[in-house]
Amino acid sequence: MQNTLKSAATFSGLGLHSGAPVRMTVNPAPEDHGIWFRHSDVAPDAALIPARWDAVVPSKLCTQVANAAGTRVATIEHLMAALAGCGIHNALIDIDGPEVPILDGSAEPFVQGFLAQGIRSQAATVRAIRILEPVEVRDGQAVARLDPSDMLEIDFAIDFAEVAIGRQEKRLSMANGAFVRELCNSRTFCRKQDVEAMRANGLALGGNLENAVVFAGDQVLSPGGLRHGDEPVRHKMLDAMGDLALAGRPILCRYTGIRAGHALTNRLLRTLFARPQAFAMVDCGAQTGCNLPGVGLCRSDIPAFS
């Protein structure tokens, strides 16, 4: 069955790149609605933006969607990951700023908000995208690939010169609340020299050591250190979860990312949907439905609620 929230969840904070204060409310929505953003600070006929792969527009260091009128919302990946990881299929998101608030740099505050409000089952059947044959895109050493699987699996590898990051690899099934238990509290990260370069170019204006993990050589500059020894690769998996959610439906596949980022994962979805023979739309019965992200999720899966 499809899911929506029982009642609205509201979040306020700064945008990571703009530094602007943002208020955002995630509202329940009817069956087969999907995920949409609604800008409260533009004319009603230009306010709605679909959270969908074909609405993604080029953007530095984040995922951004736009409509035909040019209305945009940036830095949506952590919110999209939280929605997908909680198994929420339908929502209308009201927002009054240029990007989703960064909060603590992870998806955990969104997950906490959703579970606090409650998730409601709807009568409509979930339709999923089943991958039938491999689809792959490359950009230099970066690779993003989809392979057939009965459930969403994410396999990611990163490699950084910083000693504190280095090479990290991880593979997880996203079935039965694994996203919340394993990935949702992993924060965005960057190198100290990258922060300085971004700010010189008018980016990361709302970033600080409390909403991003900052590395310098073999040091972790953020107070409290890492939440996981491999937090960077876990965050990359979180990002991939959010970017894959822009397919508009759950995907049954194994996603492999090697040094992949937002743009490459979106290119992967565009390549997939240009190849109709590579996928099929399927109704999720009891057996398939049990393997979807968010099924069996409870508040105790988040340490803050334990």
Image (spheres, helix red, strand yellow):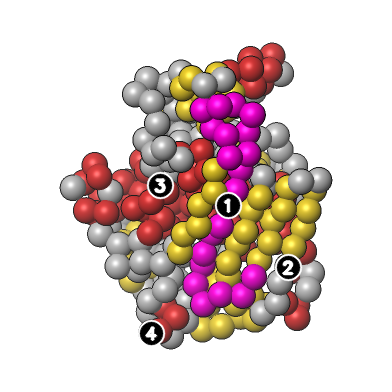
Q: Is residue 253 left or right of residue 295?
A: right
Q: Name the image quarter holding residue 304.
A: top left
Q: In the image, residue 254 lies at what x, y percent?
A: 58, 67
Mark nearer the N terminus (4 vs 1): 1
Mark 2 and mark 1: span between their CA atoms? 16 Å
Disc 2 is placed on an element classified as strand
Mark 2 vs mark 1: give the one in front. 1
Residue 78 vertical position relative to residue 206 in the rendered view, above or below = below
Residue kind at label 3, given as amino acid type: Cys
The residue that label 2 is drawn on is 135
Mark 4 and mark 3: span between their CA atoms? 26 Å
Q: Nearer the viewer, residue 225 or 42?
A: 225
Mark 4 vs mark 1: give the one in front. 1
Q: Which mark is residue 156?
A: 1
**Which residues make up the magenta segment?**
147-167
Q: Is residue 70 left or right of residue 161?
A: right
Quarter of the image with the N terminus is bottom left
Residue kind at label 1, given as amino acid type: Phe
Q: Which mark is residue 286?
A: 4
- Residue at the location (58% across, 52% down)? 156
- Residue at the location (56% across, 57% down)? 155
Mark nearer the N terminus (1 vs 3): 1
Residue kind at label 2, given as amino acid type: Val
Mark 4 and mark 1: span between their CA atoms? 29 Å
The residue that label 3 is drawn on is 184
Q: In the image, residue 171 lies at what x, y percent?
A: 50, 57
